Image (spheres, coloured by chain):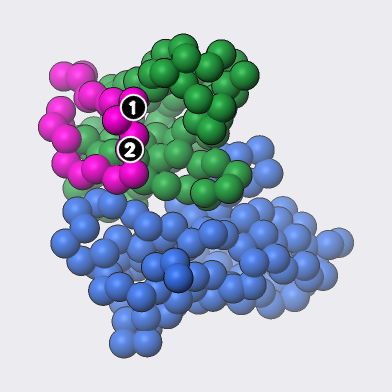
Chain colours: A blue, B green
Amino acid sequence: KNEVEQSPQNLTAQEGEFITINCSYSVGISALHWLQQHPGGGIVSLFMLSSGKKKHGRLIATINIQEKHSSLHITASHPRDSAVYICAVRSIGGAQKLVFGQGTRLTINP
Amino acid sequence: DSGVTQTPKHLITATGQRVTLRCSPRSGDLSVYWYQQSLDQGLQFLIQYYNGEERAKGNILERFSAQQFPDLHSELNLSSLELGDSALYFCASSRNQETQYFGPGTRLLVL
C-alpha cells in the first residue's frame, strides 16, 4: 500500500461543476502539498498546508490531521482546470523529502 | 514562470552514456530538490541540497549523483544510462521549509 493514496484516479466533469479530489496518507506528516501538472508537463505548487483550510481563488484545500486526509476542491470548474492534481506529504522527521500520490487526472468539458 | 530554470529541455542519448542536467534555483532560495517522473513510477524524490550541502536522499541510484555549487545552481549527473532512466527530471527550489517552486523539467530519452 502506498503511503499516499489519491481518489479518484480519473475524473471527468462538465464546466461549472464543483470538484473534489481526495488524498489519504498513512504516516505522520509535517506538511501536505497540492500540485498541479499541466498537459505540457509543468508543475505548479498550489498549496502547502499543515492544518485547517486554505483558499486561493476558486481553489480550496483542507486537511484533517487526525483522520490523515486532505481534500482539494475546485468551485465553478473551467476547462483550463484540466490537469493532473498531485498530493504530496512531508513526513515528520523526513527532512524535506516529499512522498507523492499517483495523481488525479481531471478533465473539464465545456 | 516559477523562476526556476532547467537545461536542457530535451535530451536524447544512448544506453551507457552519461548526461548532466542543470538547475538554477529562484533568487534567494538555498534549497534545491531533484525529482524523477517516469510513466510507471510517478514522481519520486531523488535528492535535496541546502546551501551546497546534501540534506536528504531519496530513491537515487548509485549511477546518479548531484551537487550544488557556491552560486547555488545544481547539477544532476546520470551515468551508465539505461532505457529505464527515460523520464522527466524536475528540479525545485525553496526557502527553508516553504513552498517548493518547480522548474519546467528536462525530458530525457534513452535509446
Give yes or no for residue B69 being in the magenta stretch: yes
Instruction: Name the foreground residue: B33 vs B94.
Output: B33
- Location of residue B91 with respect to A99 vertically, above or below: above
How crowded pointer 2 is (Cα within 10 Å; few <14, some 14-19, many 20+) is rated as some
Asked whether residue B23 is drawn in magenta, I would say no
Q: Which mark is residue B60?
A: 2
Number of the label disc, if any, that sits on residue B64: 1
Query: Residue A26 — which label?
Result: none
Chain letter of mark 1 equals: B
Q: Residue at x 19, y 53 (%)?
A: A95
Q: Type of residue at label 1?
A: Phe
Q: Are marks 2 and 1 on the same chain?
A: yes
Q: Is residue A86 above or below residue A7?
A: above
Q: Position of residue B39 (x, y in %)?
A: 60, 44
Q: Secondary structure at mark 1?
A: strand
Q: Disc 2, disc 1: CB below 8 Å?
A: yes
| Res. B33 visible in picture | no
Q: Which residues are magenta?
A: B50-72
Give the image location of residue B108, x and y in percent: 55, 25
* Residue found farthest to the right: A110
Residue B86 location, x and y as percent? 55, 30
- Which three-letter amino acid code belongs to the residue tagged 2? Ile
Q: Specify whether A82 is left or right of A74.
A: right
What residue is at 49 percent from the left and 70 percent from the top? A5
Q: Chain of mark 2?
A: B
Q: Residue at coordinates 36% horizontally, 63% vertically from top-left?
A: A89
Left or right: where A66 falls relative to A24: left
Picture quarter with the C terminus of chain B: top right
Identified at 75% across, 75% down, the residue is: A17
User: Can you say whether A102 is above or below B38 in the image?
Assistant: below
